[in-house]
Each structure stands twice: as C-alpha cells, then as structure tokens.
Amino acid sequence: MGSETPLPASRARLAAVLRATKEVVSIDAAAQTLDLDRTAAAKLLSRWRKQGWLRRIGHGLYVPVPLDLSGSEQVVGDPWVLVPTLFGQCYIGGWTAAHHWELTEQLFNETVVFTTRRISAKRATAQGVVFLLHHAAKKRLFGLKPVWRGTTRVNISDPARTLIDMLAMPDTGGGIDHVADCLAAYQKTPTYDGGLLIRNAEQFGNGAIFKRLGFLAETRLQSPELAAACRERLTQGYTRLDPALSCRHLVTAWRLWVPERWKQRTT
C-alpha cells in the first residue's frame, strides 16, 4: 500500500479525531481523543499533514482537507470557524459584524476580530484569509451574541455594540463616513435602541464615543434625544472625529475636531 493512503487503523484514528475536534484539530485534542502524549500526537498530525489529510493553519493547529480541495490553498469554506481556536477568548466585530447584521452592503476582504490575547501583529493570515486583530480587555466582552457556523460557536458583537466599537475606533468600521452610514442604517431597523447605545458607551468607558455619537446624532440622525443624552455625558478635552483624517475645524459644542468637509453640517 502506498504512503499516500493511511492504513485502515490509521484512517479510523483520523476519523475519531475529526469527529471529536469538529472543524479545527489541535495537538491537545488529538492527544486526548487517542490517549497519546503530546509528542506522539504532534508526530501523528504531522504525518497526516504530509499524507495530505490535514493542512496546518497555525502552531499545532490543523484542518481536514476535503478530497475535492486537496490541491487547493483554500480548505475551510467559512473562515469564521477558525476564529475561536486561533484567537481564544474573542469576538468578531467592526465592519465584519456590521455586514453580518445588514448595516452595510459594503464588503471587506479582512475579518475583524477582537481578542483578549496580547497580539504582536495586527494582521494574521490563515487559510488565505486575513484577520485584522485588536486587543480587547475582558471587561469589554459585553454586548455579544453567539452564532453557530456549522458545529462551531462564534461570538459576534450585536448591532449596538458593533457601533460602539466603531465609534471608539473608526478604523474598525472602515472610517467615520462608513461608520456614520452604519449608524444611520441601524436607526432605521426595528431593533434600534438609542438607550442601549448610551448604556454600551458608558460601559465601554471612552469619552470620545459620546463626542462622536452626539455629533452624528445631531447632524446625521436628526435625533435630539440621543444628542442630548450624549451631551450630558461629555468629558473634558478634545478629540478628532476620525484619528485617520485631517481634522482642522473645531466644533466646540462637541469638543470635536472634524474635517473641513464636515464643517457645513455644523452651521
């Protein structure tokens, strides 16, 4: 029998591991399933990789290779199934969550992930998918919803929480113009809750959110009630509407520097 085909006993062991580990196979899971030590499990997974049954996606992490995709670089049809294993305690957010909740039709190539792990690089690639990583403190793991992708449970920020993240860090929402569009789309949904935005912003604990949200509530949403709630919570100091943009016009009422093209909205 050629080296490309596992022996029946080996195939049975592989099947047992795949049943136990769902979409992503780790050394620890294989060791536990087959009652092996980590060294033996690591060697076995490496052998299966060389035989073409698994593909390595990270340190000690593998995914099964479907027969019809054995010659392809892309193995996992849904990259979300990789997120919990690759990034631990985390959730999908930013523009990825905004698209999931139909707050935007704009498609982005990268998947935004917030993780409690310390990250050394803000970009990670696995299975040809680029993940944009942002560190999140454990106290900010709120406003999340579990979704099932196959047999994998993945956390994603709910619509209101998604907007709070994007208001705190406009780059995670594709820039303030796109964030404003998503906020306006949320206002039109049956589940819109301005009070929830305020509560989430308070729990997040970043004063810049109230300045940006209040300004947009007044100039874009035409929502005096939401703007008033933000004004009551304004903190000292000044911030920019979008840190990535040149913001030379000061809106003193919101302690906010905005780009010149936004100036007309304040007059």
Image: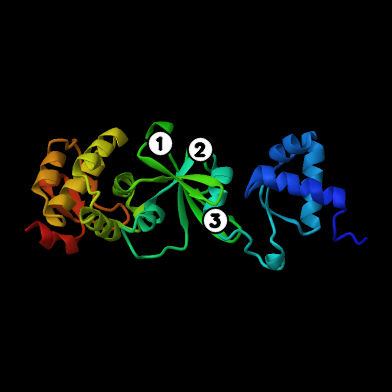
Identify the element where label 1 is drawn.
loop
Q: Residue furthest right?
A: 1
Please tell me which of labels 2 and 1 falls first in the chain.
Answer: 2
Could you tell me the amino acid type at mark 3? Pro
Alpha-carbon span between mark 2 and mark 3:
17 Å
Could you tell me the amino acid type at mark 2? Gln
Q: Is residue 41 above or below residue 185?
A: above
- Quarter assignment of residue 221: bottom left
**For the N terminus, which image quadrant?**
bottom right
Residue drawn at x 42%, y 46% as measured from the top left: 156
Image coords of residue 83 (percent x, y): 53, 48
Q: Which of the colour schemes (rainbow, by chain, secondary structure, one colour) is used? A: rainbow
Q: Nearer the viewer, residue 128 or 29?
A: 29
Decide if residue 161 is on the left or right side of residue 87: left
Residue drawn at x 78%, y 38% as measured from the top left: 34
Q: Which residue is mark 2?
A: 89
Q: Do callouts 2 and 1 mark residues in contact (Cβ within 8 Å)?
A: yes
Decide if residue 148 is on the left or right side of residue 267: right
Identify the element where label 2 is drawn.
loop
Q: 10 Å neighbourhood of mark 2: few (<14), some, or many (≥20)?
A: some
Could you tell me the amino acid type at mark 1? Leu
Image coords of residue 8 (percent x, y): 86, 52
Q: Which mark is residue 79?
A: 3
**For the C terminus, which image quadrant?**
bottom left
Alpha-carbon span between mark 1 and mark 3:
21 Å
Identify the element where label 3 is drawn.
helix
- Quarter assignment of residue 139: top left
Image coords of residue 107 (percent x, y): 40, 65
Q: Which residue is mark 1?
A: 141
